[in-house]
Image (cartoon, grey):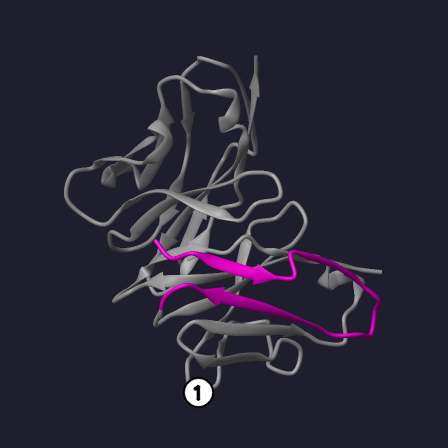
């Protein structure tokens, strides 16, 4: 069965530092890959997606993610974190339905 | 992307009662979905709301507990029936992008607390 693993439950970074959130998936073929962000008390906002083509995808709010087939990974990155980036981040895979990872809570210190 | 609204945004209900959550989209969409997010957990798909036919439920979810309506291409409701404290969750609807259900956009969610 398809699955998504986000190994980091909680990450803390200082404002202005770089960020990488890890995501690994289990699926026989290349799935459709997504990153969503959920701010406290909010719904989910789509940050970026990968369907095919260039393995480095750009999203909103300065985020990017790189698909690595050999590692079954789709890690999210941002070169300089802002305090407003503090939120819960979910990686998701869609084969015939959307399957979410357990999420990574990002805390940003000033 | 579509603008999705949900009502109510939050509610506190007594066990044994039922709550109906509404999801409204500002444009016609083919695919609508309902998810549950239990406290501190990730999202789990409850069902796909099909326009003009019965919803398609995921394993572990049944129509008697979570009846869903989809009267048209912009609106759906999810009812949480005979509630217990274990039903305390955030319930989110999402819509699939036209012609591409793989890409989904989410509503703001309904935070339900059952006492």
Q: Which residues are magenta?
A: B1-27
Q: Quadrant of residue B91?
A: bottom right
Name the chain letter of the residue that bears numbered label 1.
Answer: B
Q: Secondary structure at mark 1?
A: loop
Residue bearing the label numbered 1: B53
Residue B78 lies in the magenta-colored region: no
Q: How far from the left and from the top, in percent, is residue B2?
A: 38, 57
Q: As displayed, is residue B8 above or below residue A100?
A: below
Residue at x-position 35% and y-position 70%: B28
Q: How far from the left and from the top, in percent, is residue B96?
A: 36, 63
Residue B7 lies in the magenta-colored region: yes
Question: Which is nearer the eye, B104 or B27?
Answer: B27
Q: Quadrant of residue A22?
A: top left
The quadrant of the picture occupied by the N terminus of chain A is: bottom left
Q: How far from the left and from the top, in percent, is residue A3?
A: 43, 52
The quadrant of the picture occupied by the C terminus of chain A is: top right
Residue at x-position 56% and y-position 61%: B6
Residue at x-position 26% and y-position 38%: A67
């Amino acid at each position: 069965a398809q699955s998504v693993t986000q190994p980091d439950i909680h990450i803390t970074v200082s404002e202005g530092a770089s960020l990488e959130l890890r995501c690994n998936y289990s699926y026989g073929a290349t799935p459709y890959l997504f990153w969503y962000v959920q701010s406290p008390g909010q719904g989910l906002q789509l940050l970026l997606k990968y369907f095919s083509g260039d393995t480095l995808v750009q999203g909103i709010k300065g985020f990017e993610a790189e698909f690595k087939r050999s590692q079954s990974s789709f890690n999210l990155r941002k070169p300089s974190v802002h305090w407003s980036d503090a939120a819960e981040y979910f990686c998701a895979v869609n084969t015939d339905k959307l399957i979410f990872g357990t999420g990574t809570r990002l805390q940003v210190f000033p | 992307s579509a603008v999705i609204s949900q009502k109510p945004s939050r509610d506190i209900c007594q066990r044994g009662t039922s709550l109906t959550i509404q999801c409204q989209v500002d444009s016609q969409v083919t695919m609508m979905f309902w998810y549950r997010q239990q406290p501190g957990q990730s999202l789990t798909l409850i069902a796909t709301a099909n326009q003009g036919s019965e919803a398609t439920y995921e394993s572990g979810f049944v129509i008697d507990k979570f009846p869903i309506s989809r009267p048209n291409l912009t609106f759906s409701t999810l009812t949480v029936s005979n509630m217990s404290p274990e039903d305390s969750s955030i319930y989110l609807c999402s819509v699939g992008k036209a012609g591409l259900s793989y890409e989904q956009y989410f509503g703001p969610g309904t935070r339900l607390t059952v006492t």
